[in-house]
Image (spheres, helix red, strand yellow):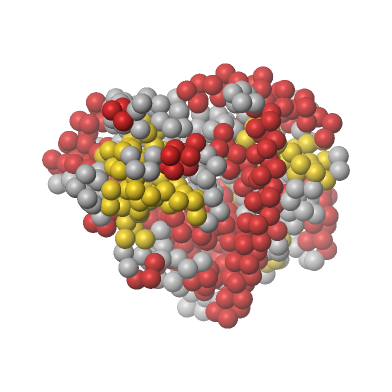
Amino acid sequence: MTPPLPLDSPARHPVAPGRPFLGVEASVQGRAWRDRLDIEGQGRAQAIAQLHGHSDLLSRVLAARGVDAETCAAYHDPTIRSLMPDPSVLVDMDATVERLVRAIKTSEKIAIFGDYDVDGACSSALLASYLESCGCPYVIHIPDRLFEGYGPNVDAIRALAADGAGLLVTVDCGTTSFEPIEEAKKLGLDTLVIDHHQAPERLPPALAIVNPNRLDDLSHLGHLCAAGVVYMVLVALHRALRQDGFWGDARPAPDLLADLDLVALATVADVVPLIGLNRAFVTKGLAVMRARGRPGLRQLLDVARADGPPRPYHLGFLIGPRINAGGRIGDAALGAKLLLMKDDIKAGEIAVELDRLNRERQAIEVGTLAEAEAEALLALGLEEQGACVVTAGEGWHPGIVGLVAARLKEKFRRPAFAIAFNGEIGTGSARSIVGVDLGRVVRAAVDSGLLVKGGGHAMAAGLTIEKAKLGAFRAYLEERLTDIVTRARHADSLLVDAAVTAGGANAELCGMIERAGPFGSGNPEPVFVLPNHRIVRATEVGTGHVRVRAVAGDGAGIDAIAFRAGDTALGAALQKAVGGPAHLAGTLSVDRWGGNERVQMRLIDMAIPERARV
């Protein structure tokens, strides 16, 4: 039977943008502003306010995210029990559990092969921690991004087999790894794949492949990250071992809920939609993280100088990048080691090293991004014509191309590729905009022979390409994506939740809005507009950020910052508008640094009021 849609799935109440907001049809970035709520949504907001006693503003935010009066209570308290289906709904789940039970009961050595990003590190640590509780020997292998590349490879498989592994489990990879899994089979290793990436019609010869994005999987769990899928495998495995009498006084069962901090971290860092089960993972995982029980995360939060209790922001912008730094330019295994570490001193040493690597990564990224932006501007021309941005450079560090692609996507508002060449072969990453499925396009390019290999999600993809085929690949993308990107960019309006004033943007308001969280992909952070506020100061600070001070008509002021906006239309407009009125759009947060609380806005757009235009 097809599982029902999650209570908080936007598909239950599709929200169409409403009327123009403040009459803005073209902001300084060329975007129209639209009320996030249509007329039907406004009716739901009114019902929520009347039946649940919420403020009008909170009711609007909830209704704009597909919530209605019936589902409001469940939305506020997403639980694992109510949102997680029977794990056996996933194809190959039972076969996977059966093989793992056999390995655990016979103390067979299990090789865990993970990806080198946050999701891979969390997935590897989740499985390893559980096997440790079972007393089952294991070894973790995280491939070196430079020398091994993404996913299983033949040399690593041979080394793991020679080391005595009898079972290979790939996490956050493996769905398209035909040759390595065939090699594992020849060497007598059974392979279990636990993944979430888009899958081809033909699958590699693994014993079992648990992937909600398999074409024959009807679980409707394709929004899970790999760590979420691993967690479901562990729930099913835990059930099987309990039924088998494996746990007892001599071997106490582990608390799976205590590992939700890892699932939450991976879910936020991998930018999967925060709907359904994912919201429960993040909500409960953040609660676990606040107890600061895992030494590795505790040390990393302190090194990153996280303010206040852990929030999705901390996971996505402070913790995630530091764990990723190991896989990008350092030791790829550092992230998984940190998450499994029980010793505070050793965990602190790894956290400091990851922090150092992250600063080094930032320095490398600045130079590469400048080259990529120059190439993109030359290719697009003054009128920025082109469906997507494809940049490439000899000697670029492969570990930062994903970040460069993300920055290019933000700057040019179209899908972007960044490819690092080392001789005749290049490895690259791509980031997309809403409405353009890049994973599907990259897989089709592989099938057509334009790419050596590639795959990914709708919003992100990776690829390997021969330099001689780069021009043909660019032409292929323009042909396949021009109409799709045109439609997506046309529909790219800024959706606004409400207007507030500087005086009303206080800590109490932010605390109230957090009740609609956690926010992230698929459950966007509320966007507010400060209408007709006078900009009294706009100064470039740091690495291209623009810090702003705005004042309302009643004299109340608020600080705001536009990240990486120094050389953008937004940054230029902010500095030009000093002394005059502006509509400022952004998200609100409470800065708790130094023990003091102050609200600031992260600016994402700006418009000049019609009466102030000349």
Q: Say which quadrant the N terminus sits in.
A: top left
Whether 160 is drawn above or below 75: the answer is: below
Please provide percent x and percent y for residue 338: 60, 69
**How many numbered marks appear?**
0
Question: Which of the two residues, 19 or 158, is positioned nearer the viewer here?
Answer: 19
Please provide percent x and percent y for residue 525: 38, 45
Name the residue located 47 percent from the left edge and 78 percent from the top edge. Answer: 249
Question: Which of the two residues, 11 or 397, is positioned nearer the viewer here?
Answer: 397
Q: Say which quadrant the C terminus sits in.
A: top left
Res. 353 image quadrant:
bottom right
Name the residue located 58 percent from the left edge and 43 percent from the top edge. Answer: 407
Res. 377 image quadrant:
top right
The residue positioned farthest toward the right in the image shown? 423
Whether residue 51 is visible, yes or no, is yes
Whether 264 is drawn above or below 404: the answer is: below
Whether residue 61 is visible, yes or no, is no
Please provide percent x and percent y for residue 583: 33, 37
Name the residue located 86 percent from the left edge and 43 percent from the top edge. Answer: 423
Name the residue located 62 percent from the left edge and 47 percent from the top edge. Answer: 403
Question: Which of the two residues, 86 or 495, is positioned nearer the viewer here?
Answer: 495
| Relative side of 137 to 82, left or right | right
Whether 375 is drawn above or below 537: the answer is: above
| Relative side of 452 to 201, left or right | right
Please provide percent x and percent y for residue 22: 28, 30
Res. 156 image quadrant:
bottom right
